[in-house]
Image: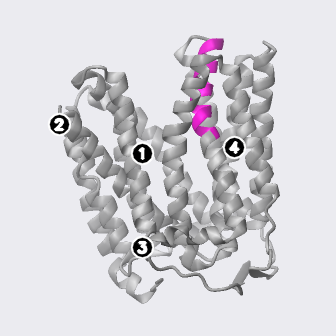
Amino acid sequence: MSTHYDIGEPVSTTGRWRVLAPFKYREFRLLIAAMSLFLFAEGMWTVVMALQVIALADDPAALSLVAACLAGGMLAFILVGGIVADRVPQRAVIIAVEAANVAATGAVAVLGLTGELRLWHMAVAATVLGIGAAFFFPAYNAYLPRILPAEHLLAANGVEGTVRPTLQQAIGPAAAGVLIGLSFPALGSVAVTVLMAVGLILLVAMRPGNGQHIVMTVEREKPHVLTDLRDGLRFVVHTPWLRWTLLFASTWVFLALGPIEVLLPFIARERFADGEQVYGLMLAAFGLGSAVGAVAVSSRPLPRRYLTVMMTMWGVGSVPFVIVGTTSSLPLMLAALFIIGLAEGAGVIWGTLLQRRVPAHLLGRVSSLDFFVSLAFMPVSMAVAGPLSKVVPVALIFAVVGIAPVLLAAVALVAARMPHDEIAHPLR
């Protein structure tokens, strides 16, 4: 377990530029620059993977196989990733993951350029990237509090919450589509590898404990890995605000992710002309809302009623799903999706709470459990949404998605006594 003390000059955290405060720290600048490159590369890889698989085998089943390898790798190793993040220096984990990613995408690029690429190569590369993500995110979440003072974590999470949808969901896929459209899929793999390699160089350049923070390491006996996992699970179960927030989040993922991923493309095609382009606009509106929400939340101090604000944003912010399920007006549709994305800005508060209220030696495991919940319910939601839409009107499905989170958020607030908890544990 590590504890750090800021011995540098104090940083002003007031004013509209609060979100920029973490950039004072060299290690954060390097980390977020590398993270931005990786997110950009991952956004490109989504398109590169699909088009490369189609070029090798023009069969939806082939693409499903490769995509399943990516998701399966994450799901199979995410809990292991949390344990490793609490046992091994997080910086080393992050560097190892990105080195493996560079090797995987680099191999795909070389094989593609030489004409030797096969479908099983793509499946292996996707599996490596999926496993890497399972180790990367718990390590990243646990590492951030070790290079930044607590008062800057909200802003740092806001920066990450802004660049993620912007680069991974919008600019990255668009850039890959243009590049591959003008050339061929293998060149897209080359671009992804170059971006990841530059990011890896930035990570290696990081110097932990560069003088701004004194890091005191307290050695603790490392128990069996299953004991580690049990301790993390016990902490979640016995921490009401954490337990009920995860219950809310898992239910929200089950209710909303399937309709968003599976039904939204059909809504775009059936209600609007040029459905493919409209679907892209709909995703862009959601992504833009997420970015704006992250900036708005992180530009201000952490709310005194941080749990209440977070749950209210997630609950009430889901209400526009009712509009998504019924409207044939494109401006109204885009506005509703923007507002839903805007409410996602509460995720910045959530990430900050994990980093500030979860003990440092448990943070990797708790972060991995959080990630595991999302991964576990996502495919179930997607599997259910399509068949359900054949027997239940789409408008009714989206009405439930819009209204149920409001009730669930209210239950979570009361059951976990969140208003009392947040006053008893002030973080401002």
- Dot 2 or dot 4: first in sequence order is 4
Measuring from the top left, give residue 190's x and y in whole percent.
73, 29
User: Amino acid under label 1?
Assistant: Gly
> How far apart are labels 2 and 3 at the CA level?
35 Å
Q: Main secondary structure of the magenta part?
A: helix
Q: How many other residues sit within 10 Å of disc 2, few (<14), some (14-19) or many (≥20)?
A: some
* Mark 1 element type: helix
Q: Which residue matches tag 4?
A: 131
Of the residues under marks 2 and 3, which one precedes in the sequence? 3
- Residue bearing mark 1: 287
Tell me the amino acid under the disc marked 4: Ile
Which type of secondary structure does the marked residue at label 4 adopt?
Answer: helix
Q: Is residue 75 visible?
A: no
Give the image location of residue 4, x and y in percent: 71, 82
Q: What residue is shown at x 28% (from left), y 40% (from top)?
A: 334
Q: Nearer the viewer, mark 4 or mark 1?
A: 1
Between circles 1 and 3, the one closer to the viewer is 3
Q: How is the image coloured?
A: one colour
Between circles 2 and 4, the one closer to the viewer is 2
Nearest the eye: 227 or 384:
384
> To which residue does mark 3 refer?
300
To which quarter of the image does residue 80 belong? Answer: bottom right
Mark 4 against mark 3, which lies toward the viewer?
A: 3
What span is in magenta?
41-56
Q: Residues within 10 Å of mark 3 (few under 14, many from 20)?
A: some
